[in-house]
Image (tube, rainbow, N blue to C red):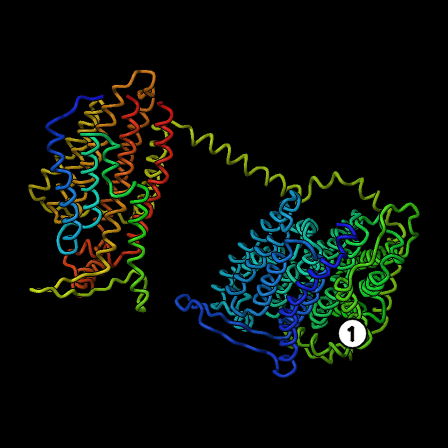
């Protein structure tokens, strides 16, 4: 896509055609701001959803939710504007916009849910939609693989989350977040709580790219830039942290909670910071630094104290305000200069001046320099660590991660835009169109505004912090303001960051030598396991689908027998023989008929005769039904048996007339001993189960109901038929659908047999 | 080619429609006496099988009201549709409705349940019959 097609009048027209879509998130944003001003938090509303399971569609919006909602709708608006420019002229842009809007709604639902199962539904929706968005360019293989990876990891994490939610709900006796938080002090002694929390951690960590699931996020950079700016900086990846922050009010007192979150968060941040230096693609650099920030956020959520709650809120906000613009900048470079490789991007200031301005301001905020909102966030973080009294190791780790942030900021702003302009440039970089400039400029302007006047966002951050730490009081932090730790930390981070920036290339080469270590990492484990699945499927298919009919039948009968015997084993203690009343003569006669048929089948060799004597078993059963009062059953059994014997006998008779080579030679002798064994075990198991069933008291509630209601409710005297066509009509509908499907499945096989013979 | 069974051929010209009539009667009486769609359908299959054994599977297929797969699909569709009138009057899906048609001497009760059972009948006839006939025609061709 070159400059000429980009800026032709036609493309400008398509930009304009997509722009009105931004009105959807914009009006939601406006509505939200208006409501926040006029209606005091918290808001709560609930509709009945699945009353039989006691799952209401319960929404609850407090300070934390409100902060997320503002980011989701606000950045959503800017992403829609940006996307209108970025995807102008791309025929597939409507799909992206449609998916982005759906994704926004799913995010809104997830952060407003009070009921954990409602939250789970929205959580899964975001996973599925992000799969579709990352795999947007589905003709590209790496794009498909990244989408698959994101879905497999977040989807598997979602299953863990569901298990954790159910366990937590069972322990706490409620699925409402508010009620769980209120009940939390009483739960801390429950032995199942650590298991429930561990399951929740897996869910949240996979969503928010924490170790060991961190690798999916940089790979998801295959997505178009507007998608990355939205999903992978401001919304989707924060969802896991959101859940943890939400539950922080309930469990922050637990040591298990604190150590897990601080440990995993710090580990993730350090690992991601190291990975950042190994990349040359600006977008992947930004992605790794996002993972590092997510790790820092997880660590902060784990820290006890009010300062940590405020720091989480501030960092959420600051990160969205600088990372989204930086992703936009990466998109503008890609669009204007045709590359995101930092080796080929220098001195872009002259070609993309407005993008350069946005990049510089965003970088200042990212580096946490004074007069930006990033400084406020860094300030809050330092105070939080002082208040919580963290281990020295964690303190050093955050210093390291902060320095890398400074270095990344310097790469994104100074290296790319202020470096020496390459003389031998073959392409002609150009500035992005207005819709791609306004969003990043607006966000960095806000970052500066809030940096100069933090009091503007104080109420918002205070309300969010209060949701995480209920005893939080907004004034507390100001009163304990301590200048020196903050100044010290800032200076140290900045100094180290500059050193890393200057040595970036040398560090890059150094770290690249250690790439053999990747073999041990979770990502290579993921790829190995992914390759293992088709191998396993192939091996199973080879073992089970051998094409030998006796083998199939034995496998089937054997499996059923095992199930029967297992059931007997479980029920053994309660197994007692029912008292046997003397049987009426006709029943004895039928039983003898069945037994005669079965015995004959055992001794007869000729297939046709075998079929006929096994028909004796069927007719005997039909007679038995007749004498025990099940006329309908007997009737059906007679019909089935007759049709089966007639058709099968015909087929057998004609098969026998075939020339020998066409007959399938199966040495039956080989299967006989095993078949006898399975048959004996099956008979034994079934007899046991029947005896067991007969020994149980008979609950006649249902049959009484059907007998009593058959005529008055369904106008029929034949109870069996009334059950089939009326009381249980849905079952019957399913059954005839299965019968129809069986025909559809069998016809091609029969056609194949016909084709082979001719 | 097997020798023609002349007696069976003559007999079946009468027997085939008689068997089908009987199967319909069993279908209709099912609500109050032993019978119904399943058994009725199986009896119709038996009629088709007899036809196939005496003449040929192709001849039996020709005598079906529709080709087997379509017959089956039609049956399932009728059963499915018979559940809809209940929905339109505000009842759950597959709640059957009853109404009476006044005749000169008495009145005839009718119901969507009969449609449902007819669907079962056709589905069984189409599927089991289609399967049997297809199997029989496969072995016929091998001669």
- Residue visible at 19% across and 37% down? A641
Using the image, name the chain to which the residue with label 1 belongs.
A
Q: Which residue is mark 1?
A: A450
The image shows residue A420, relative to residue A43, as above or below, that is above
Q: At which x and y percent is residue A372? A: 82, 70
In the rendered image, the residue lying farthest to the bottom is A38
In the rendered image, the residue lying farthest to the front is A9
Q: At which x and y percent is residue A527? A: 63, 41
The image shows residue B50, relative to residue A7, as above or below, that is above
- Residue visible at 21% across and 45% down? B41
Would you call the spot at circle 1 few (<14 residues within 10 Å), some (14-19), or many (20 or more)? many
Q: Quadrant of residue A417?
A: bottom right
Give left or right: position of A125 versus A700: right
In the rendered image, the residue lying farthest to the top is A660
Q: Nearer the viewer, residue A581 or A322?
A: A322
Q: At which x and y percent is residue A413? A: 85, 58
Q: At which x and y percent is residue A728? A: 27, 56
Give left or right: position of A12 versus A354: left
Circle 1 SS class: helix
């Amino acid at each position: 896509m070159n400059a000429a097609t980009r800026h032709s009048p036609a493309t400008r027209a398509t930009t304009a055609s997509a722009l009105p879509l931004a009105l959807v998130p914009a009006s939601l944003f406006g509505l939200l701001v208006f409501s926040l001003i006029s209606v005091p938090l918290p808001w709560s509303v609930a509709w009945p959803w699945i009353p039989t399971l006691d799952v209401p569609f319960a929404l609850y919006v407090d300070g934390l939710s409100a902060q997320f909602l503002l980011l989701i709708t606000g950045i959503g608006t800017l992403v829609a504007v940006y996307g209108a420019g970025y995807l102008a002229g791309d025929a597939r842009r409507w799909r992206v916009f449609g998916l982005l809007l759906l994704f926004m709604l799913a995010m809104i639902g997830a952060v407003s849910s009070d009921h954990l199962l409602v939250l789970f539904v929205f959580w899964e929706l975001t996973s599925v939609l992000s799969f579709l968005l990352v795999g947007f360019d589905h003709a590209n293989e790496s794009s498909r693989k990244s989408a698959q990876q994101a879905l497999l990891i977040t989807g598997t994490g979602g299953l863990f989350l569901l298990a954790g939610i159910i366990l937590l709900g069972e322990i706490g006796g409620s699925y409402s977040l508010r009620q769980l938080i209120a009940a939390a002090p009483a739960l801390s002694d429950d032995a199942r709580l650590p298991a429930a929390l561990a399951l929740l951690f897996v869910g949240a960590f996979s969503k928010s790219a924490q170790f060991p699931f961190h690798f999916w996020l940089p790979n998801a950079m295959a997505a178009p830039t507007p998608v990355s700016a939205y999903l992978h900086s401001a919304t989707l990846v924060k969802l896991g942290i959101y859940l943890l922050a939400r539950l922080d009010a309930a469990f922050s007192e637990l040591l298990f909670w604190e150590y897990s979150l601080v440990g995993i968060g710090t580990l993730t941040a350090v690992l991601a910071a190291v990975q950042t230096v190994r990349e040359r693609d600006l977008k992947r650099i930004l992605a790794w630094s996002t993972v590092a920030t997510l790790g820092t956020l997880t660590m902060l959520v784990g820290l006890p104290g009010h300062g940590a709650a405020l720091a989480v809120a501030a960092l959420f906000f600051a990160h969205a305000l600088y990372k989204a613009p930086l992703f936009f900048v990466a998109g503008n470079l890609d669009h204007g200069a045709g590359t995101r490789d930092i080796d080929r991007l220098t001195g872009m200031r002259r070609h993309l001046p407005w993008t350069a301005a946005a990049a510089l301001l965003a970088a200042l905020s990212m580096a946490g320099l004074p007069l930006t909102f990033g400084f406020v966030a860094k300030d809050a973080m330092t105070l939080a660590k002082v208040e919580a009294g963290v281990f020295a190791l964690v303190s050093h780790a955050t210093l390291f991660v902060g320095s890398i942030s400074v270095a990344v900021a310097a790469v994104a702003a100074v290296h790319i835009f202020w470096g020496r302009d390459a003389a031998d440039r073959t392409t002609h970089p150009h500035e992005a169109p207005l819709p791609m400039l306004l969003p990043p400029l607006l966000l960095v302007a806000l970052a500066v505004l809030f940096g100069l006047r933090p009091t503007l966002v104080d109420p918002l951050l205070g309300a969010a912090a209060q949701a995480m730490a209920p005893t939080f009081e907004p004034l507390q932090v100001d009163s304990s303001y301590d200048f020196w730790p903050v100044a010290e930390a800032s200076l140290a981070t900045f100094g180290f960051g500059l050193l890393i920036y200057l040595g970036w290339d040398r560090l890059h080469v150094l770290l690249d030598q250690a790439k053999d270590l990747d073999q041990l990492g979770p990502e290579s484990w993921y790829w190995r396991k992914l390759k293992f699945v088709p191998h396993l499927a192939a091996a199973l298919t080879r073992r089970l689908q051998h094409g030998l009919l006796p083998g199939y039948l034995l496998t089937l009968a054997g499996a059923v027998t095992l199930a029967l015997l297992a059931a007997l084993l479980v029920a053994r203690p309660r197994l007692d023989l029912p008292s046997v009343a003397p049987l009426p003569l006709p029943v004895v006669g039928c039983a003898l008929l069945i037994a005669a048929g079965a015995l004959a089948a055992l001794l007869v060799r000729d297939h046709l005769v075998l079929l006929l004597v096994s028909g004796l078993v069927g007719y005997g059963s039909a007679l038995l039904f007749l004498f025990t009062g099940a006329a309908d059953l007997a009737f059906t059994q007679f019909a089935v048996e007759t049709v089966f014997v007639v058709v099968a006998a015909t087929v057998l008779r004609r098969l026998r007339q075939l020339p020998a080579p066409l007959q399938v030679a199966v040495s039956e002798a080989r299967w006989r001993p095993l078949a006898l064994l399975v048959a004996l075990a099956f008979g034994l198991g079934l007899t046991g189960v029947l005896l067991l069933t007969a020994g149980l008291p008979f609950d006649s509630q249902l049959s009484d109901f059907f007998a009593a209601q058959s005529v008055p409710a369904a106008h029929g005297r034949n109870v069996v038929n009334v059950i089939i066509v009326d009381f249980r009509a849905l079952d019957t509908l399913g059954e005839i659908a299965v019968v129809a499907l069986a025909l559809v499945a069998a016809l091609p096989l029969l056609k194949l047999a016909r084709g082979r013979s001719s | 080619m097997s020798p023609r069974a002349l007696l069976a051929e003559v007999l079946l010209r009468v027997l085939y429609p008689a068997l089908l009539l009987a199967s319909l009667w069993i279908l209709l009486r099912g609500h109050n006496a032993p019978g119904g769609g399943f058994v009725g359908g199986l009896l119709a299959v038996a009629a088709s099988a007899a036809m196939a054994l005496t003449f040929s599977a192709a001849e039996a297929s020709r005598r079906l009201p529709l080709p087997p797969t379509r017959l089956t699909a039609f049956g399932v569709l009728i059963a499915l549709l018979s559940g809809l009138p209940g929905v339109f009057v505000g009842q759950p899906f597959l709640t059957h409705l009853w109404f009476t048609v006044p005749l000169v001497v008495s009145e005839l009760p009718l119901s969507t349940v009969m449609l449902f059972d007819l669907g079962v009948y056709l589905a069984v006839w189409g599927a089991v019959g289609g399967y049997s006939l297809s199997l029989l025609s496969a072995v016929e061709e091998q001669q």
